[in-house]
Image: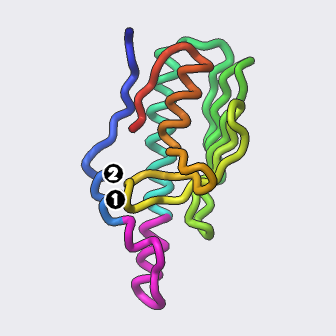
Amino acid sequence: MEVLYGTRNFLEEVLYANLDILQEPSHGLQAAFAEKALQFKLHWLLFWFIVTWQDYGDFIDLDGFDIDYANDVLTVKLGELGTYVLNKQTPNRQLWLSSPVSGPSRFDWDQVTKAWIYRRNKANLYKILEDELEQLCGKPIVLS
């Protein structure tokens, strides 16, 4: 079975390794740096999602597949299967996901697991997307 693998690079690994400073920034310069680093990380992550989902759209060849990114909101339309919306909430240090399968979720960065985690049920953002996209589209994708 063919599987599409999202490509993560060295830059992302460096950013993940240093996101612990974002957990509880102190005052002054460290807090300002932490906010800028978070904005950059979230922007980069959404860009990575755009590229990976565009490749997945080509891979699954689905009618009505479309990606739009505007005002820090990424919208992925899967035709009649539904629409995903992912947006960054910089003030809350979160990623918000609206899924046609699991509904709305808010993800926080977890330094221990180095993943975006939904605090209510400890679900991993990448795992949710991998499972749901395969369920909806019938072809696997590896994001983690």
Task: State the image coordinates of residue 9 (x, y, percent, origin top left).
Answer: 28, 44
Q: Quadrant of the C terminus?
A: top left
User: Which residue is disc 1 drawn over?
Assistant: 15
Are the residues tagged 2 and 1 within 8 Å (C-beta)? yes
* Image position, residue 70 (x, y; %): 64, 47
Overall secondary structure of the magenta section: helix
- What residue is shown at x 66% (from left), y 35% (from top)? 84
Q: How many marks?
A: 2
The picture quadrant where one finds residue 89 is bottom right
The residue beneath circle 2 is 12
Q: Is residue 72 visible?
A: no
Relative to 74, residue 24 above or below: below
Q: Quadrant of residue 78?
A: top right
Q: Which residue appears at 55% of the width and 12% of the height?
A: 61
* Residue 140, visible in the rendered structure: yes
Of all residues, the one furthest to the front in this rendering is 121
For residue 95, above or below residue 76: below
Tell me which amino acid carries mark 1.
Answer: Leu
Q: Secondary structure at mark 2?
A: helix
Decide: few, some or many residues near mark 2? Use Cα within 10 Å; few <14, some 14-19, many ≥20.
some
Q: CA distance from mark 2 to mark 1?
A: 5 Å
